Amino acid sequence: MDDYFLFVDDDDDYSHLLDEVDQKLDSPVPEPPRELFDKSLNEPFATLVNKVPTLLIYVGFSTCGYTVTLSSCTVTLYDPHLSMYDETERWHLRINGEIEGTPHLRPRSTWALKNLVNLCRTYFAKGERDNAIEMARKAQVIARETLPHDHAFHNTLKHIIEAGRVDGNFCNICLKDFSANPGLLEDGYKCDEQKPFCGRCTRLRKTCKGYGVRLKWQAPQGVPKPKTSRNKQQQRSSSGAKAVSTSSSEFSSLVVRPDPSCIVPTDANPMNRYLLNHWSTTLATMVSMVSAPQNPFLVHLTPMISHSTALRAVLCSIAACHLAILRHEDSLHTLATRHRLVAVSSLRQTIQTESPELSLATILMLQVSERLFTMDSGVDHLSGAKAIISQGSVNMRNDSSTSFLLGLCSYHDILASVSRGTSPVFEFNGRFPIEGMESMKELTSVLRIVGRISGMRGRCREDLDVQGYAVESSLNALDQSDDVMSDVEHTVQAYIHAAFIYLHRVWHNEGAPHFSAMKHARSCLTHLSLVPVDSPLVSAQVWPLWTAGCESIDQDQRQFVRVRADSMYEARHLPSLRRIKQDIEEVWKIKDEQRNLIGVDNVDCIKAILRTRQREADLA
């Protein structure tokens, strides 16, 4: 086959790059001639590379962004540094292709400068001002040689440096504005840091989004980097494709991106930092109904990590479970189990001495983990939460963290009551909105009614009728028919129609093809379809999708349910979403058989799964 060369701009170890290239080419990459390391990018080098069909160039910071023009070869630039901020690919690839003209290399191009400036802005937006200044100064040196007369570009770099020197904890809106236009700072504008809303946002009539969680992520210092000597690399390059290493591939796939919204204890090892970073940047946004920066899982749980080994371990376990699915790595499943055991063991040891709030947070995250990753351990975490709350010390507090925890507890308790076919464990009476957010009060009201419906199971007919009419009246009072609705309102309406279906199943054991069940199923699915699948509110839409989906007879509606469940899984990769689709299809099969026999079905969806699967449906 054709020869391949890898050019490296400095003497740093680059064995991990060789492994990546090996995998992409399905063939080992030979070591480049030694003299290339000692030569600048000049005509002899251009002549040399023109003799091979493919040139691979590793672009580091010191020679960032070479523009390559060759007449007879395809050029690929590997830029791992800049790709740290590329959300789509681990390696940033740029292919120039076969371009007509004289072979030459033009170092320090405007493309490189633009990338450096973008990197400056990224650092600045993340609050890493020292890094922003360093990158801007590097860009200044390059710009003096490449763009000596571009005064606007030089001013941009100057503004970035000046902006980086300004001290202060900007509100999120000001930080965004100054990151996009650092020149504002030079003109005398700044955030006055007033609480709860900064004066600049008030003056400009902007919605100040507060100061968010401005906690600094500790960059990993102990992540193992494969060290391979040049001599070993030469041996490796001659040993063929069998010598491809996997350790460096694992390392490159576990690169931790700095995240200012998470804090890690100083004693956390590199892998735990990586797991907690995945929790804060990815998973926390999937389990919450609220988008950043108000995400209550980050706002309230993040500060607790340093004070609770059990909570830290359960968050690491959740992250490892999710990464095991994304990366198809069994070793991460093992790691998740290990962290979960540590969490349970630590909780047992500290539950009598630790803050009740920390213990409750740990128990609730164990419940979340159980539901999302379909563990079926049989452990009743909600009873453990009730034992903590019944002590009174948590329930008596009146702060946002307590409201968040109790609201989360109520949410999982009510949906667990549906999946178990029992009454809720708690009686919060709607005092604590879902996730502690006032914007979720209306949805909380509907959930409270759902809890009342669960409590109707097993009652005598007279009590059923009294409570059934009362619940029906409450649901009718909440029903709306506005033409324009927000995602929250569509979700609330979906819950209301699902609650009607649930009510008539518990009250009258009625379902499709009864007119009422079919009408509410259709309306519920319509409201769900109007909420984008990437909306945070979709994390709360499993139960209405399940309830309306199970009662759907129309093939188009069933197809929507399948597609919606698949889309939710593809957006989140949570096993519970895949299993809920399987459960709905199982219910359809049972209901269809029943209708074919007697014309109607008296199949309770929840009881059907409890009977056939010997477990609860994953509705939370």
Image: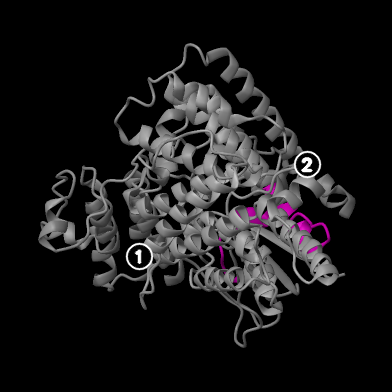
**In this rendering, is residue 79 above or below 375?**
below
Report the residue at 47% width, 32% height from top.
264
Instruction: Please report the bounds of the magenta region as a residue range.
Output: 14-43
Res 256 visible: no
Instruction: Measure the C-alpha gap from mark 2 to mark 1.
Output: 48 Å
Residue position for label 2: 330
In this view of the protein, which residue sits in the foreground, 178 or 303?
A: 303
Percent position of residue 286, x then y: 53, 52
Instruction: Please identify the quadrant where the N terminus is shown.
Output: bottom right
Q: Which mark is residue 143?
A: 1
Q: Residue at x 35, y 65 (%)?
A: 143
Of 270 and 422, which appears nearest the observer? 422
242 lies left or right of 620: right
**Residue depicted at x 32% and y 49%:** 438
Q: For mark 2, does the 10 Å Cα neighbourhood hold few (<14), some (14 to 19), or many (20 or more) residues?
A: few
Residue placed farthest to the front in the image?
A: 462
What amino acid is labelled 2 in the image?
A: Asp
